[in-house]
Amino acid sequence: MTHILAIDQGTTSSRAILFDGALRVVASAQEEFAQHYPAPGWVEHDPSDLWSTVAGTARAAIEKAGIGADDIAAIGITNQRETTLIWDRDTGQPIHNAIVWQDRRTADTCDALRDAGHEPMITARTGLLLDPYFSGTKVKWLLDHVPGARERAAQGGLAFGTVDCFLIWKLTGGRVHATDATNAARTMLYNIADGCWDADLCALLDVPMAILPDVRDCAADFGVTRADLFGREIPICGVAGDQQAATVGQACFQPGMMKSTYGTGCFALLNTGTDRVPSKNRLLTTIAYQLNGKPTYALEGSIFIAGAVVQWLRDGLKIIREARETQPLAEQADPAQEVVLVPAFTGLGAPYWRPECRGAIYGLTRNSGPAELARAALESVGYQTRDLLEAMRADWGAQADGVLRVDGGMAASDWAMQFLADILGAPVDRPVVTETTALGAAYLAGLQAGIYPAPEDFAKGWALERRFAPAMDVAVRDGKYARWGRAVAATMNV
């Protein structure tokens, strides 16, 4: 048994990737699923879509690889974080659609808690800010709004979980209700210093602790799958939230190393080692990974809209048919035009944390067209990344590595990555394997299963595909970033 099956359950699609004993990709499968928007600022997923696409892509990848379940040593899971589900322990049926991490319906709840003075305590214990992004207020909303949910929860009949936890439950046939430390750390209910669910936070949000899952290391025993799913029981040995899995996949094991993943959103993490660095610039203090009972911490900046801005060009404006058309379109843009897009479609994330903001476009002229909008869309990701790195450097100081490792779908765009290096004024390194989220999940499972090496040896295998060096004139860079700052300020003042 020399293969690892990585399940990568994302915001817009589910993927399954098979890795061999040398961590090479053998086969993969991917399937998109529907997004549901029941009200402005609300985002939901049908839990049955999450499960069916995971099960379907896993079987498809195994079939493509031409191997059997007997060849698979373990399964690793990585997932969209903060997305919240509650289901019935007896039937396994969710009581409501999953509330997605992008969802802003609990903004008023967060405002009330902040006005009551609770944010400092929440931040001190969880490393998080009071924001609808995190799971805690989503859990409260579900218990408050689904008829009978609070009563059923009080009787011990309901289970809460992030997507990884729900998948573990489904894969094991309801035998295991568990999550890992990185996902627990994103709920606003978990004390990252003490390494446990926090009774005071649960009481504050009126969340019964009986519905919470067990919390385990990222490389640990999460049970075995039902035999009927793949032909035999397969151990689940690795779990990490998608951004933490990417941090592992990028081999950012040393304090000061940084990575940024460009999926639906953009998420930058800076490894701070054993130090929980409190942010003075509205970043998050979180768990990067936890091995052998010992957490490694990170500073994180979260951008809600990155790759999703390209989806908007495709599905909303319909000026492209495929994401890959964005780069050649952007290259055609008139360099004299200074169109700036602030993609606050679901609010602004770090370092602003303004959930009420909505998107805006500045600098339009009569000649502005699809090319200028495409360029502005790609540039918006670079600007937002610089916002994060400026805050990280202010919190961490000169110890921060000057190189940014990148991955995710948008990292494949040479134009976008060159602009990123230009606007940061720092090298951007793209690895040979850009599917680092799935790679990290696979590595964690393989580490636990005993077929992959220790972290320091795994890091030696990290391979550079291309380094993007900054080439933009400093005055041009500063002028463009100042224009972005004015656009953000104007958006927040609307």
Image (tube, rainbow, N blue to C red):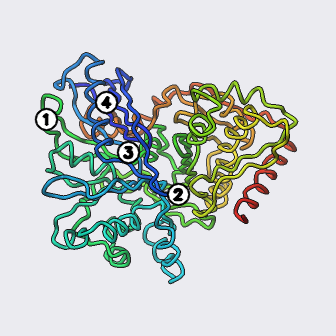
Report whether 181 appears left or right of 304.
left
Report whether 7 appears left or right of 129.
left
Circle 1 — which element?
Answer: loop
Q: Looking at the image, tell me whether mark 3 or mark 1 is earlier in sequence order.
A: 3
Q: CA distance from mark 1 to mark 4?
A: 17 Å
* Residue 362 tag number: none
Which tag is nearer the camera, tag 4 or tag 3? Answer: 4
Q: Identify the residue under disc 3.
A: 79
Q: Is residue 203 visible?
A: yes
* Residue 57 tag number: 4
Circle 4 — which element?
Answer: helix
* Residue 233 tag number: 1
**Does residue 209 lie above or below 238 as drawn?**
below
Q: Which three-letter amino acid code belongs to the residue tagged 3? A: Asn
Which tag is nearer the camera, tag 2 or tag 3? Answer: 2
Q: Quadrant of the C terminus?
A: bottom right
